[in-house]
Image (cartoon, rainbow, N blue to C red):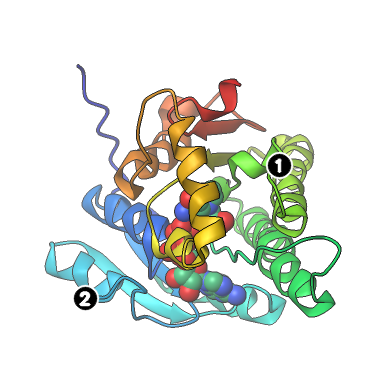
């Protein structure tokens, strides 16, 4: 099979939620493709353990730095995007940080609902807004890529709070793509399926949710759960000039799960 190897030399990429899981792999891939990477997260320590992402990228010959960021705080996002000015300004904004809390709509604590929406929906809305304004002010249009989910499209049992936040990601992406096209800014989303990260490990701790998760994986036509390595290349494709006519897209990377 052919290989797609985009280069992001001279470009600056922000990856929120870049300390762990999918974001960590996205950041590494951009680092390996010669981008300067700003890893933004609550904490630099990966949930899965190991060397912090930015240090790993630097060890691997790339250029990366860590910016402590809470994406649910708009001020933090402003500081983050401002930090990219030191490297010429953000060219690619990956709004990936996400939070999962399961539970029935009949019982979910209102604070949990707010916590999920503050990260998954508000964080992506303001990440898109702040990055787009910065690109327009610098007259240097780039690309914005949001992490959606199969939950952006398909309801899952006892996940209304998560599904609704990821549904919002889909429509933030589409609406922003429509509005920002005239500025030359493309906005797309990647919708991962079941991906083996600590995100899912947290969810799988209880026997009942683990059983549900196992059932979901059984329904993957390609026959296995995904890995961050399966998902990350989609971000590089969407950020690259190979995708220069692609905007408002929700790209499923789910082993075919959403076909049903
Ligand atoms: P993860 O839990 O391994 O990593 C998420 C990262 O986001 C962590 O480093 C965490 O510290 C960070 N984060 C959480 N809240 C934050 C905040 N307020 N500000 C800054 N950073 C914050 O999770 P994973 O699996 O890598 O998920 C990444 C994205 O992919 C999320 O948006 C998630 O909803 C989405 N996703 C994951 C799937 C999966 O099966 N793992 C499936 C579909 C979507």
The percent position of residue 79, horizontal first and vertical second, equals: 58, 80
Mark 2 residue's CB less than 8 Å from ligand 1: no
Classify 127 as above or below 30: below
The percent position of residue 95, horizontal first and vertical second, equals: 56, 57
Classify 134 as above or below 146: below
Classify 137 as above or below 176: below
The mark total stands at 2
Quarter that holds the N terminus? top left
The answer to whether any part of residue 107 appears in the image is yes
Task: For the residues labelled 2 and 1, say whether their Cβ atoms are less than 8 Å apart.
Answer: no
Q: Residue at x 67, y 61 (%)?
A: 120
Mark 1 residue's CB less than 8 Å from ligand 1: no
Q: Residue at x 28, y 41 (%)?
A: 7
Q: Which residue in the protein does label 2 denote?
A: 51
Considering the numbered disc 1 on the image, is that residue within a helix, a strand or a loop? helix
Q: Which residue in the protein does label 1 denote?
A: 170
Q: Residue at x 28, y 50 (%)?
A: 29
Q: Quadrant of residue 53?
A: bottom left
């Amino acid at each position: 099979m052919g290989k797609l190897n985009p280069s992001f030399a001279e470009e600056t990429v922000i990856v929120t939620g870049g300390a762990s899981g999918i974001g960590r792999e996205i950041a590494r891939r951009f680092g390996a493709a010669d981008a300067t990477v700003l890893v933004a997260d609550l904490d630099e320590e990966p949930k899965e353990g190991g060397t912090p992402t930015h240090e790993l990228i630097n060890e691997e010959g790339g250029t990366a730095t860590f910016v402590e960021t809470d994406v649910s705080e708009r001020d933090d996002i402003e500081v983050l995007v401002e930090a990219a000015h030191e490297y010429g300004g953000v060219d690619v904004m990956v709004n990936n940080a996400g939070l999962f809390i399961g539970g029935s709509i009949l019982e979910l604590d209102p604070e949990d609902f707010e916590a999920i929406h503050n990260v998954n929906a508000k964080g992506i809305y303001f990440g898109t807004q702040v990055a787009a304004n910065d690109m327009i002010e610098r007259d240097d249009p780039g690309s914005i890529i949001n992490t959606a989910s199969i939950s952006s499209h398909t309801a899952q049992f006892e996940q209304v709070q998560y599904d609704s936040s990821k549904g919002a990601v889909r429509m933030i992406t589409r609406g922003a793509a429509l509005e920002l096209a005239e500025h030359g800014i493309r906005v797309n989303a990647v919708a991962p399926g079941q991906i083996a990260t600590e995100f899912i490990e947290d969810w799988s701790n209880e026997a009942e949710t683990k059983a549900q998760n196992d059932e979901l994986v059984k329904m993957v036509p390609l026959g296995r759960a995904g890995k961050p390595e399966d998902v990350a290349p989609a971000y590089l494709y969407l950020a690259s000039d190979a995708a220069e006519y692609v905007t408002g897209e929700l790209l499923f990377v789910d082993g075919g799960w959403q076909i049903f």
